[in-house]
Image: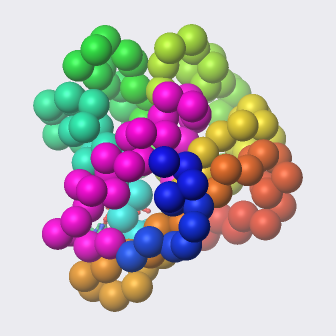
Amino acid sequence: MAEVLHMQPISYGMHNIDEIAKKIRGLVGQYPIITFTGSLGAGKTTLIGRILVHYGVQEPVTSPTFTYLQQYTTADGKIVYHFDLYRIDSVDAFLAAGFDEYLHQPGSIVFIEWPEVIMPLIADSVCHINLEYCDEGSRLLRYNEVPARKKADSFVKKS
Ligand SMILES: Nc1ncnc2c1ncn2[C@@H]1O[C@H](COP(=O)(O)OP(=O)(O)OP(=O)(O)O)[C@@H](O)[C@H]1O
Ligand SMILES: [Mg+2]
């Protein structure tokens, strides 16, 4: 699966988002943390919502922009932590909220939108997904299996 997504950027629209979501779901066994970067409205929450459907999560997935964190339970009992860190402006703020304890809980899965600010806290092996707006009806997905720390400098958070 990783190889498939590695080969080239994938363009997708709402018509085939489930196909993409299913592929990404296949990666999660290997990578307990998946980061999602991309500009405002690139489609991060939407894609996470569709991935969670493939985990058997039935409740609607909404953006935790103001609460920072939403928790879901998969059909097989795994806990999913969904972060949106757009409004967290430093590692210290993240730590002060006690959020780091959710990053490495055995058996859990972590999805992080706007992960840039906490890249130094994330273990070397994460699955990193970038979404880019193409036009109203499509987005471009890039997948990168990289040590997050090495990439952190190249991430720019929108103000
Ligand atoms: N592949 C796609 N093709 C067309 N439209 C899409 C696609 N993915 C998402 N959208 C649409 O883009 C809009 C923004 O999506 P979404 O809220 O998921 O973005 P986001 O990246 O999470 O934004 P934010 O940075 O504010 O959290 C929604 O209206 C959604 O339906
Ligand atoms: Mg979002």
Q: Foreground: 121 or 145?
A: 145
Observer able to see residue 17: yes
Q: Position of residue 131 (x, y in %)?
A: 48, 67
Residue positioned 67% across, 50% down in the render:
145
Q: Classify residue 12 as left or right of residue 29.
A: left
Q: Classify residue 92 as left or right of residue 71.
A: right
Observer able to see residue 111: no
Residue positioned 73% across, 50% down in the render:
146
Look at the image and give the residue range highlighted in magenta: 12-36
In this view, 2 is above or below 41? above
Residue positioned 28% across, 22% down in the render:
74
In this view, 91 is above or below 8? above
Q: Position of residue 156 (x, y in %)?
A: 70, 68
Q: Is residue 51 a member of the stretch shown in magenta?
A: no
Q: Quadrant of residue 102?
A: top right
Residue positioned 39% across, 76% down in the render:
11
Q: Foreground: 74 or 19?
A: 19
Pick the quarter of the image with the C terminus: bottom right
In this view, 57 is above or below 111? above
Q: Foreground: 8 or 79?
A: 8
Q: Position of residue 101 (x, y in %)?
A: 62, 17
